[in-house]
Image (cartoon, rainbow, N blue to C red):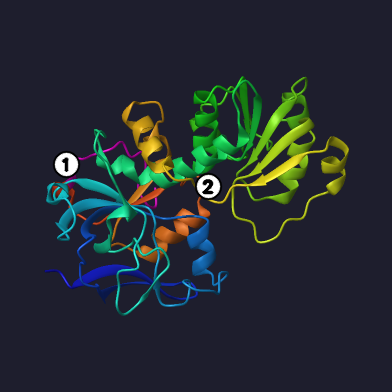
Amino acid sequence: MVKKSKAIVFSGVRQIELREVTLKPVSSTDVMVETWWSSISTGTEKMALNGLIPSPPFIFPFIPGYETVGKIVQAGDHVNQELIGKFAYVAGSFGYEDVNAAFGGASQYIVCPLDSITVLDGLDNPRCGIALPLGATALHIVDLADVKGKNVLVLGQGAVGILAAELSKHMGANLVAVTEPHQKRLDISRADIRVNPEIQDVSAALAGYEFDVLIDSTGIMSAIETGLRFVRFHGKVIFGGYYQRMNIDYSQAFDKELTFIAARQWAKGDLQRVRELIAADKLHATQIFTHTCTVDEDLMGAYTQAFSDPDCLKMIIHWKSADSQNDADCSITGKKGH
């Protein structure tokens, strides 16, 4: 039985190391997963590494990570043993004895309850399971927005914004427009109207359109204020990111009697819904997989690039050798440092 595991540990502010940690025993309702791929959250993990979430479970040292895909290698006595050998998405774990877990998915082996995993049956390539949490976040945002038959404006085409725009179209939006200052991100987007505010006049580009729904995935107050100008009377605004503080001009909200909704994360069943959308080729997960590295490379460099390079939508960390993954290969368009 595996008792030790390599794990990525945030040991202090802007300090990352790969260290050995001790796993908790596998209980009767647990599974053990051997990680093949994990990824980096550019929101929560960036704030945590910079010491901006000084509360449990983000007390140094801790294992980050809630975007992990691996193969089930052990199952507790009360778990269906036929799951062994299947790939699964892991939403994180607290199954460590000697280190905190801020989601805890960035580990070579993960011990977690059965209900913390989503089995990836139906996916041609299990690595696409990395997109489940961001896809589920975007799906929950679009559900809250109630986009069917409506005009939707999405601010920001990071990973969540790109997926929210695509899902809005899939869920029956009449028109989807997006704004994004980084052209490579804009080029990936499947929106009907794509506006780069760095080189285009947003007012001119969106002239004549009135939007029922504004979805923000930028976290930038000035961008939100600009976007509010295009929202109709009694329109709806969905905050799709995590915000340390809200500071926007109230006059537009007052004049238009706007509704504001904060999207927390995802709802029960959303991970499974996204898995089915990916399996049916109705949500294109690989479009956000732009960069890759291995767990034995410069981890600080990989995290820094994921946090700061606008061309890096999603950094995939490989935990297994290349030979092990030849039969489970997704299309990756970039490498760390390229």
Other-residue count near label 1 (Cα within 10 Å), few / some / many at <14 / 14–19 / ≥20: few
Q: Nearer the viewer, mark 2 or mark 1?
A: 1
Label of residue 250 in the image = none
The residue identified by callout 1 is 326
- Tell me, yes or no, if residue 290 can be seen here: no
Q: Nearer the viewer, residue 277 or 199?
A: 277
Query: Magenta stretch?
Result: 325-338
Q: Position of residue 201 (x, y in %)?
A: 75, 30
Q: Main secondary structure of the magenta part?
A: loop
- Under mark 1, the amino acid is Asn
The answer to whether one can see residue 17 in this image is: yes
91 or 302, nearer to the observer:
91
- Which quadrant of the view contains residue 301? bottom left
Q: Does 329 appear in magenta?
A: yes
User: In the image, is residue 106 above or below residue 153?
Assistant: below
Q: Earlier in the sequence, mark 2 or mark 1?
A: 2
Q: Residue at x 16, y 39 (%)?
A: 327
Q: Residue at x 37, y 54 (%)?
A: 91
Q: Secondary structure at mark 2?
A: loop
Q: Amino acid at mark 2?
A: Pro
Give residue 310's mark: 2
Number of other residues with Cα within 10 Å of mark 2, as a class: few under 14, some 14 to 19, many 20 or more: some
